[in-house]
Amino acid sequence: MKRYQTFKLFQLREIAQHNLPGIITKVMTMLFFSWGIAAVEMMKHKNNRSHY
């Protein structure tokens, strides 16, 4: 919960300064980082299925 609040504070600061490229960069970084973690977890589970 604390991390989300910290991210929210950073976003509010960027919005107040009208720094749209900074906001987009931070949001895209978090989004792709989350997708990367999800992809790695899916690959781990996919390789565990063996018929041997």
Image (cartoon, rainbow, N blue to C red):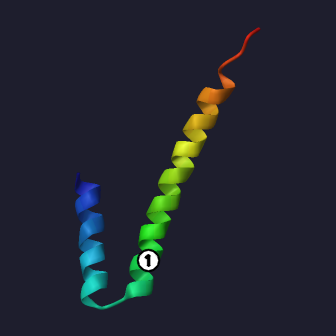
Determine the image quadrant of residue 50: top right
Name the quadrant of the C terminus.
top right
Q: Is residue 46 above or below residue 37?
A: above
Residue 43 left/right relative to 20: right
**Residue lying at 26% horizontally and 68% vertically, measured from the top left:** 8
Q: Is residue 7 above or below residue 13?
A: above
Q: Which residue is mark 1?
A: 24
Q: Residue furthest bottom?
A: 18
Count all numbered tags in the image, as a single digit. Answer: 1
Dot 1 falls on a residue whose secondary structure is: helix
Q: Residue furthest right?
A: 52
Q: In x, y percent, where is residue 45? A: 59, 28
Q: Is residue 17 above or below residue 3?
A: below
**Residue lying at 52% horizontally and 52% vertically, measured from the top left:** 35
Determine the image quadrant of residue 6: bottom left
Q: Residue furthest top?
A: 52
Please tell me how crowded label 1 is: few (under 14), some (14-19), or many (20+) other residues with Cα within 10 Å: few
**Residue lying at 51% horizontally and 57% vertically, measured from the top left:** 33
Under mark 1, the amino acid is: Ile
Q: In x, y percent, where is residue 32? A: 52, 60
Q: Is residue 7 above or below residue 20?
A: above
**Residue lying at 65% horizontally and 21% vertically, measured from the top left:** 48
Q: Nearer the viewer, residue 6 or 49?
A: 49
Q: In x, y percent, where is residue 17? A: 29, 91
Q: In x, y percent, where is residue 12? A: 24, 78
